[in-house]
Image (cartoon, rainbow, N blue to C red):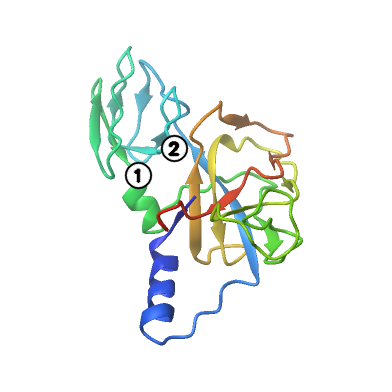
Amino acid sequence: MLDTQYKQNKKIDNEYRGQSNTFPATRYVGLIVASAGQSPRSTAVTSGQYTVPAALNGRLYKCTTAGTTGSTEPTWPTTAAGTVTDGTAVWTEQTTALYSGTIPEGSATGYARIAIASSLAAWSGTQGAGTTVASSGSSGQVSNNAAISFAQVTTSLGLVVGFAMYDALTSGNAWEFAIQSSGTPTTIGANISPNIAAGAAVIGYDTNGQ
């Protein structure tokens, strides 16, 4: 999971510029959706739609030139804001946009973000998933101790490819985000309850402190 620019600015002002920074007592989990589906082939796509590759790579791509995708998948760029022509359409990699807070959150009847308190009980320590005492490990990562269960939606939510953490139930500021990097993303149709398994929402730093 990556920090957003909003969170980075808060941390920098707090640590180096003497400004107070109260982290959210509750975070709200929202789902990121690829509105064009997963790597659509020979398909008309419109500007503003999102997709992910057939082999997930932890990156999201936005259609920035409408057109019809090619019959074979392009080589997806793995640099921030990189572009690729796909048939007559053009996709742009979205890490930079996500960092700035432009996050394509899903929308459906019955969908709402899920609140999770900032607590030892809710989030594991750095020593391992499921732990409920103060962090003593070296992983630099925490994860959700319980499944994050959303209410049943009554209209289609679409292809869920990641999640973001906000400081409000609606609107507000995104603090972190993640795009699925392996496995198969799930399409959430009508009358389905989205779910993030315990330990699957991983938040933290790599061993270099990034």
The residue to which callout 1 is attached is 94
Name which quarter of the figure residue 159 lies in. top right
The residue depicted at 62 percent of the width and 44 percent of the height is 108
Q: Nearer the viewer, residue 188 or 1?
A: 1
Q: Nearer the viewer, residue 147 or 43?
A: 147
Name which quarter of the figure residue 186 lies in. top right
Q: From this viewpoint, which residue is outermost toward the top?
A: 71
Q: Which mark is residue 110?
A: none
Q: Amino acid at mark 1?
A: Gln
Mark 1 burial class by Cα count in 10 Å: few <14, some 14-19, many 20+: many
Quarter of the image with the C terminus is bottom left
Q: Is residue 120 left or right of residue 50?
A: right
The residue to which callout 2 is attached is 58
Q: Nearer the viewer, residue 206 or 95?
A: 206
x, y (%) of residue 105?
Answer: 52, 48
x, y (%) of residue 89?
Answer: 26, 27
Q: Earlier in the sequence, mark 1 or mark 2?
A: 2
